[in-house]
Image (cartoon, rainbow, N blue to C red):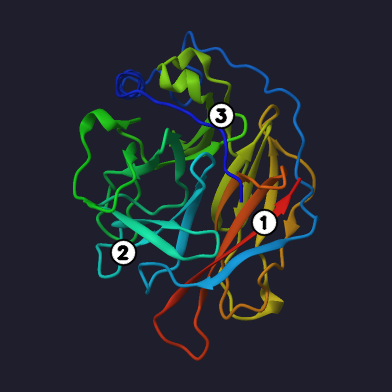
Amino acid sequence: MDLILPSTLSRRSLIRLGAAAAGGAVLGSAVAPGIAEATLPTSPKFNLTATEHHLFGPKIMHETHHGIQGFTFDDVNRRLFVVQAQNKGSGADLVVNQVSASGKVLGSMVVKRAGHGVSIAAEPVGKTTYIWIECDADKNTKDGRGTALARVQFKNITRTSIDSSAKFFKGSKSITAAVDPVNKRLMVRRIENGDWWLSVWPLSKARAGKAADRLVHIKQPSYGRTFQGYTFYGQYAYLFYGDGHTDPAKINSTIRRLNLNTGKFDGDAYVTKAGKSLNYREPEGMAIHKLDNGHVGLFFGFASHQSGGGANRYANLYYKQL
């Protein structure tokens, strides 16, 4: 895999963005006064019926007894990160694994009382990767969800606390982030007044704390299946739904394409049968990554169980390409 596109984010800019968010200037149930929104440029879209490729799996991660949740790519430093709950943790304790393209765990960072891990985002700064991850879970259990978003440097350490200057969008009911590494944009998914909303900023504007340069703020349309992950590329977001199952006849792992300019689903729902032979199969996570052949990939994951029973859980990644 070829990972590209450097990016930077200063601590001072993050603090400004965090202060604006805490004050409600960045996100709200409606567009805050003074915040302009633009139409995203026309962009290609993934053909959801296109061939599905297998990256790796079944592979066991650092936390042997938990399936994967979200994942993300650092497209500069050729790194892949997968998040999962911690073995014998509270349920809201998350472990971010650095993983090779073949699924080998290269290092792990624990974030205590983080949340559920539906989505994380990687940001390269030179040779360093920063992870955007939920934090300060409302419950220190498996039902806990983050109440703020944090940006932390990936290190092989346990983070029992996160500096307040690295937290923003404080006071959220639930919040996660995703990144479009090709177009250098950040998406935040958050509950506002009881509904899920998606907002997008150019990474450069987010770094500068320029809330007024928000590009998108739309209500996520409802869809009658369990939500399992999301990502975005250009003017389209991709939403992943479905339930775990042991019977291939009951597959309902569904990808929906959402036009961020209209706030409406674009095209029909697509039920993917990638990994249909896995022993238990639950859809988990999505991410965008630029491949070494120059194509952009839409990646999606599945958690699976070992054959014959047992506590071990496995990660499986698949992708489509433009």
Q: CA distance from mark 3 to mark 2?
A: 30 Å
At x 56%, y 58%, the residue is 226
Q: Which residue is mark 1?
A: 319
Q: CA distance from mark 1 to mark 3?
A: 20 Å
Q: Quadrant of residue 8?
A: top left
Residue 21 relative to residue 278: left or right: left
Q: Residue furthest bottom?
A: 308
| Depth check, front residue: 297 or 102 | 102
Q: Is residue 310 above or below residue 44?
A: below
At x 36%, y 67%, the residue is 62
Q: Which residue type does callout 1 highlight? A: Tyr
Residue 80 relative to residue 129: left or right: right
Q: Secondary structure at mark 3?
A: loop
Q: Is residue 294 above or below residue 284?
A: above
For label 3, count other residues whose C-alpha is less than 10 Å away and answer few (under 14), some (14-19) or many (20+).
Answer: some
Q: Which residue is mark 2?
A: 86
Q: State yes or no: discs 1 and 3 in contact (Cβ < 8 Å).
A: no
Q: Which residue type does callout 3 highlight? A: Lys
Q: Secondary structure at mark 2?
A: loop
Indicate which disc, 2 or 1, sits on the residue closer to the N terminus. Answer: 2
Residue 253 relative to residue 97: left or right: right
Percent across and percent down for residue 265 are 72, 41
Q: CA distance from mark 2 to mark 1?
A: 26 Å
| Depth check, front residue: 116 or 71 | 71
**Foreground: disc 3 or disc 2:** 3
| Depth check, front residue: 176 or 53 | 53
At x 28%, y 47%, the residue is 138
